[in-house]
Image (tube, helix red, strand yellow):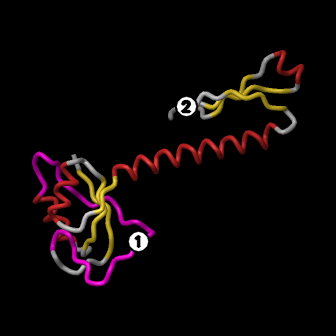
């Protein structure tokens, strides 16, 4: 969404009625509000808009996410342009190797970030790329 998330319309008739009309940009909903509770109501509506946009973005991200454990699964997910979560040994040389091995039609893969809230990493989990013991889960994606 670009621009102003909430438009407040005030006309002569609205002033006479001590109300304003608000229009939400994210869904176009219109609502008349009393000027007495305007600040409180606007704060609540802005919070609701934020939550709605955040949840939509999270759902979109989750729909693109693929959890993989092997190189073969990684290559398939990468070719499908997925956001990939994979166990990784956290070694720079392995990341460089992944980038080199995936150059070409797929677009070279690279680490994107490490989630703060790490999913449980079962003991004995191996790095999807090197086969070494994995130290953490990491997001991977294509670089262009």
**Please, what is the dominant secondary structure of the magenta stretch?**
loop
Pinpoint residue 21: horizontal percent, then vertical percent.
74, 26
Q: Residue furthest bottom?
A: 123
Quarter assignment of residue 135: bottom left
Question: Is label 2 or label 1 in front?
Answer: 1
Pinpoint residue 117: horizontal percent, then vertical percent.
45, 69
Residue displayed at 10% across by 48% down:
104
Quarter assignment of residue 94: bottom left
Tag 2 residue: 3
Q: Is residue 116 magenta?
A: yes
Q: Reply above or below: 142 against 36.
A: below
Magenta region: 102-130
**Mark 1 Cα-neighbour bin, 10 Å: few <14, some 14–19, many ≥20:** few
Tag 1 residue: 118
Which of the two discs, 2 and 1, labels the residue nearer the N terminus? 2
Tag 2 near tag 1, CB within 8 Å: no
Q: Residue furthest top?
A: 12
- The local secondary structure at tag 2 comes to loop
Q: Report the front residue among 140 and 76.
A: 76
- The local secondary structure at tag 1 comes to loop
**Mark 2 Cα-neighbour bin, 10 Å: few <14, some 14–19, many ≥20:** few
Q: Reply above or below: 106 against 96.
A: above
Pinpoint residue 108: horizontal percent, then vertical percent.
17, 53
Quarter assignment of residue 137: bottom left
Q: Reply above or below: 136 against 67.
A: below
Q: Is residue 20 magenta?
A: no
Residue displayed at 19% across by 67% down:
70
Residue displayed at 32% across by 61% down:
139
Q: Is residue 37 left or right of residue 57?
A: right
Residue displayed at 77% across by 22% down:
10
């Amino acid at each position: 969404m670009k621009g102003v998330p909430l438009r407040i319309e005030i006309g002569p008739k609205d002033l006479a009625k001590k109300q304003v009309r608000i229009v939400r940009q994210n869904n176009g909903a219109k609502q008349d509000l009393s000027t007495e509770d305007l600040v409180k109501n606007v704060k609540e509506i802005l919070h609701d808009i934020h939550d709605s946009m955040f949840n939509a973005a999270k759902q979109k991200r989750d729909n693109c996410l693929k959890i993989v454990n092997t190189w073969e699964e990684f290559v398939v997910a990468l070719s499908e342009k997925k956001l990939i979560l994979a166990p990784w040994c956290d070694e720079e040389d392995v990341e460089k190797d992944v980038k080199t091995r995936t150059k070409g039609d797929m677009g070279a893969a690279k680490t994107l970030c490490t989630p703060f809230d790490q999913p449980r990493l079962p003991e004995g989990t191996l790095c999807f790329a090197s086969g070494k013991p994995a130290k953490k889960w990491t997001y991977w994606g294509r670089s262009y």
